[in-house]
Image (cartoon, rainbow, N blue to C red):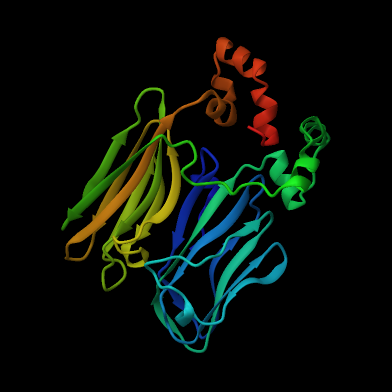
Amino acid sequence: MSVDIKKVVSYPPEAFIGAGPTDLLSGTTTLANYVSIDPYVITISGLSFDNTKSITVHVDADGFTDVQRFDSTLGTRGLDYEEDAKIAVTKNAKIYTTSSSAVSAYQWRHRVVVFEPTVAMKLQLGMRLSASEVDLANKYGLAQALQARVPEPFKLDYGIEELREIAFSATSSSTVARVVVPNGKKIIILGISATRPSAQAQAYLTIIRDNIQVENIDLYTLPSVSYTAPLRIVSLDKFEVDLNVLGSGTYNGRIVYGIGRFTLEDKVRWMPDSLTAAERKTAEQLDLFDKVEAGVQ
């Protein structure tokens, strides 16, 4: 299942989970397909698979075949962990399987981190720059900086000052978390985990951020409560997590989130039109507009 990037992203960089279960055919089955991702850049990571015999997983990206390939999911860590893979994508990507036989309701998941690329990221990935972006690259010496060192990877908990966790146990549908963002702050959902039922379509976790649904995940594809599947979903108003129970059972789970200040840099990046006159003056004095676009802030 692909993540509908343009529908769910609001405050990039953000990270979302796309997951099965998926009925696999004998032969080739597409698990997720990403096309026309412009103006964003994505990374695919968080790959996790049920250990099933005779399944090969392939990842194609930007015209290259098998940039990542798992010849057998029996050699992977299973659903309670993630594989060590991180694939940058600027144009398109596909995750698919080849199998010697059909498999019903195959459990798997992946994570997509969505970036609005800065000039520095475009240079790093070999993307074309506009004339104004070339000027910014020259202004901050980005080409030389990239020659000097490899940029540090983006961390999903960037901007967090406090960390919180919600644990729940429920046998029926309910709202298991509802958090209002404190004034002057932002909240970032950083991870989820839950009891994994023995069959698909027994229970779902739905994440609603600022009144928009951004995730609806079958617990059948999630890690158990001993491991947290990482996310990064930013909220400036409130978030809600609903447990939708369709099959009998007790469902336990965790939601991890962080709180940080809603900074002037955030406002420049996500909603520059909302800056007050005083904020705009400060941002200009700090050269924030160019620094944020260039990726040096």
Q: Is residue 134 left or right of residue 70?
A: right
Q: Is residue 153 left or right of residue 129?
A: left
Query: Vertically, is 267 above or below 227?
Result: above
| Residue drawn 41% across the image and 79% down it | 51
Which of 51 and 84 lies nearest the eye of the viewer? 84
Q: Does residue 173 appear in this view?
A: no
- Using the rendered view, name the quadrant where residue 233 is placed: top left
| Viewer can see residue 229 | yes
Q: Residue at x 21, y 66 (%)?
A: 247
Q: Where is residue 164 drawn, in percent x and y?
A: 31, 41
99 lies above or below 83: below
Q: Total of numbered circles in the picture?
A: 0
Looking at the image, which is closer to me, 234 or 137?
Answer: 137
Residue 193 lies in quadrant: bottom left
- Nearer to me, 275 or 48: 48
Residue plotted at (21% across, 60% down): 251
Residue 196 picture quarter = bottom left
**Above or below: residue 60 compared with residue 239:** below
